[in-house]
Image: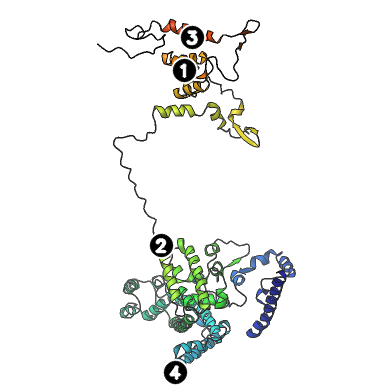
């Protein structure tokens, strides 16, 4: 059995060795294997230790968590600029917009847009010839990650992020140069594209509100236009010089061109990613789906990543070593999944739970798309509706506490009582003694004494402190164990043979009634005259020196004499027609009342 397992492992190892050169040939370069980035030699570790000795280098060095979490065959996504960082810049001293925006004239944008136009024209010509499904599949053949159009989709999606960054910078440039004319406009319209449209509509006239109301109505909501008109009527701004106004107009043209390219790129990416990963794009959107595919290294690689790792894909946070991580801790373990519409609409208290839910479904739909199941994206749409219902359930307030009515009281009959004479007697009978109460108390900071036997140890508490407060009290009658009359008679019957002494003890307990003597006589008859237990004897040891034989009938005679003396003058025994209690008859009923 072990030999077969060894052969199987050898075959798998040989297959991996054959796949690694093939992958390097497909990529066109001698790339390192997938696990090359995860294994390090001890020489590299020693180099890192030697480099870490310099404190100044540690403070300047930055760690990019995205690179550490990115697979070897993944494409690093473009980094988005923080709007707060852009707003803190001062671009009023920049004389030309080309100094901060060079993307329009770059070959990267021109090449990407040309490729997009080429693939769109091919798809349009193929769809006009007949089958649209064939036209879609024509560009994606073989391995998805190695296709030219897939690489174009990834580059175009990253380029859209760079375009957004350029729009933020140019918007800040326009704000800084137009603020001397209308400084309140930046607070009224925070959106970059709407701000540019409002600047073009207002212009650089002496009076901003003259003839501009109709132009603003076609661009902005009516409420915003009213606020702008009221603010512009008493603004403190002044008319810009012609050179400054030309800089503002140049910035507006750049924003328009960038927005056109951005719209073209996003429409192409959305149309193609919905075919490559229909369920994934239906669940999280086309932009987030493209980012996940890019950072994971393709649809097949994304389908192999567990859900717990999908939620951190794209979590790019740069922190200086040794610096404070207070602000970075708020966005820990939040990647591209947090940019999905379903998560972005959630409040912060349930956003973390929504990210986990969406990540689990992303792992599921990625495997569906990798196996070409549900090509229309209906499964992803169904999962999105289910997640929306779950999020709504999480947002529901907790149910109100119901006021439970008391049960209807029972009228008449027996009911449960929590107190009473019997309950008090039971508490007195089974109540804790002073010794037990002291043993249950423990003095703070003082080790208690222990008593143990047979591998068991019991703490004595304050009972072992020899305080002298615990006294052995005499037993009370109310706390003594009592035996019922029935059990007493039964015990006497079982121990019959003790002679008249047993009857005398019963007489003492029962008050000396004749019934007890009758029971005693019957008990003697049951045991036999002079009969006793196996341990009884007729020899009695007395204070008198010597041994004498005891007469069993002496006790009987003594008892009869005592009964005749004490009960001979009884009320009922002297009544006419009633036999004496000393005779053989029993006491009759009382005389009738006259």
Q: Is disc 3 placed on a helix, strand or loop?
A: helix
For numbered disc 1, what is the local secondary structure?
Answer: helix
Mark 3 or mark 2: whose residue is earlier in sequence: 2
Residue ID at (48%, 77%)? 287
Q: Are dots 1 and 4 in contact, CB under 8 Å? A: no
Viewer-nearest residue: 407 or 358: 407
Q: Which residue is mark 2?
A: 393
Residue under label 3: 559
Of badges 1 and 2, the one in the foreground is 1
Q: Are marks 1 and 3 in contact (CB under 8 Å)?
A: no
In depth, the one of 115 and 302 nearer the eye is 302
Which label lies toward us, 4 or 3? 3
User: Which residue position holds label 1?
Assistant: 522
Name the colour scheme: rainbow
Residue 533 image point, x, y percent = 57, 20
Residue 461 lies, in percent from the top left, at 59, 32
């Amino acid at each position: 059995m072990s030999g077969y397992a060894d052969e199987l492992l050898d075959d798998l190892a040989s297959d991996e060795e054959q796949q690694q050169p093939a992958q390097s040939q497909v990529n066109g370069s001698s790339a390192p294997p997938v696990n090359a980035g995860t294994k390090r030699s001890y020489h590299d570790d020693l180099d890192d230790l030697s480099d870490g000795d310099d404190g100044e280098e540690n403070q300047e060095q930055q760690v990019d968590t995205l690179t550490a979490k990115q697979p070897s065959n993944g494409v690093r996504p473009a980094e988005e600029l923080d709007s707060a960082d852009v707003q803190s810049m001062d671009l009023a001293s920049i004389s030309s917009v080309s100094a901060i925006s060079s993307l329009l004239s770059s070959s990267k944008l021109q090449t990407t847009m040309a490729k997009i136009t080429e693939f769109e024209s091919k798809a349009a010509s193929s769809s006009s010839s007949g089958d649209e499904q064939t036209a879609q599949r024509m560009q994606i053949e073989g391995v998805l990650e190695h296709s030219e159009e897939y690489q174009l989709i990834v580059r175009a999606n990253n380029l859209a992020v760079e375009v957004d960054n350029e729009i933020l910078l140019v918007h800040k440039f326009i704000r800084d140069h137009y603020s001397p004319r209308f400084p309140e406009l930046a607070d009224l319209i925070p959106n970059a594209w709407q701000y540019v449209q409002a600047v073009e509509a207002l212009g650089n006239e002496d009076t901003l509100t003259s003839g501009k109301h109709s132009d603003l109505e076609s661009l902005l909501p009516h409420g915003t236009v009213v606020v702008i008109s009221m603010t512009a009527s008493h603004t403190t701004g002044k008319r810009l010089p012609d050179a400054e106004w030309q800089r503002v107009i140049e910035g507006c043209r750049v924003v328009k061109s960038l927005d056109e390219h951005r719209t073209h790129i996003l429409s192409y990416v959305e149309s193609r990613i919905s075919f490559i990963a229909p369920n994934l794009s239906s669940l999280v959107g086309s932009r987030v789906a493209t980012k996940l595919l890019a950072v994971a290294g393709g649809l097949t690689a994304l389908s192999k990543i567990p859900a717990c790792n999908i939620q951190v894909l794209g979590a790019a946070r740069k922190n200086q070593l040794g610096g404070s991580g207070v602000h970075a801790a708020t966005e820990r373990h939040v990647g591209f999944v947090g940019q999905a519409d379903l998560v972005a609409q959630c409040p912060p208290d349930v956003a973390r739970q929504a990210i986990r839910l969406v990540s689990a479904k992303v792992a599921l739909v990625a495997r569906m798309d990798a196996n070409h199941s549900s090509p229309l994206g209906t499964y992803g749409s169904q999962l999105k509706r289910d997640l929306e219902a779950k999020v709504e359930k999480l947002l529901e307030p907790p149910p109100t506490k119901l006021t439970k009515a008391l049960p209807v009281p029972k009228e008449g009959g027996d009911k449960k009582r929590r107190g009473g004479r019997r309950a008090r007697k039971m508490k007195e009978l089974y109540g804790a003694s002073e010794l037990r109460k002291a043993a249950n108390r423990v003095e703070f900071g003082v080790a208690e004494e222990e008593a143990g036997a047979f591998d068991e140890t019991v703490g004595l508490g304050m009972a072992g402190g020899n305080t002298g407060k615990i006294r052995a009290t005499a037993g009370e009658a109310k706390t003594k164990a009592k035996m019922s009359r029935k059990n007493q008679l039964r015990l006497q019957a079982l121990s019959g043979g003790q002679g008249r002494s047993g009857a005398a003890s019963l007489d003492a307990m029962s008050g000396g009634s004749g019934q007890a003597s009758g029971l005693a006589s019957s008990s003697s008859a049951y045991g036999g005259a002079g009969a006793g237990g196996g341990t009884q004897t007729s020899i009695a040891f007395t204070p008198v020196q010597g041994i004498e034989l005891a007469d069993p009938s002496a006790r009987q005679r003594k008892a009869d004499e005592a009964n005749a003396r004490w009960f001979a003058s009884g009320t009922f025994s002297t009544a006419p027609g009633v036999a004496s209690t000393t005779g053989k008859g029993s006491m009759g009923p009382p005389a009738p009342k006259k």
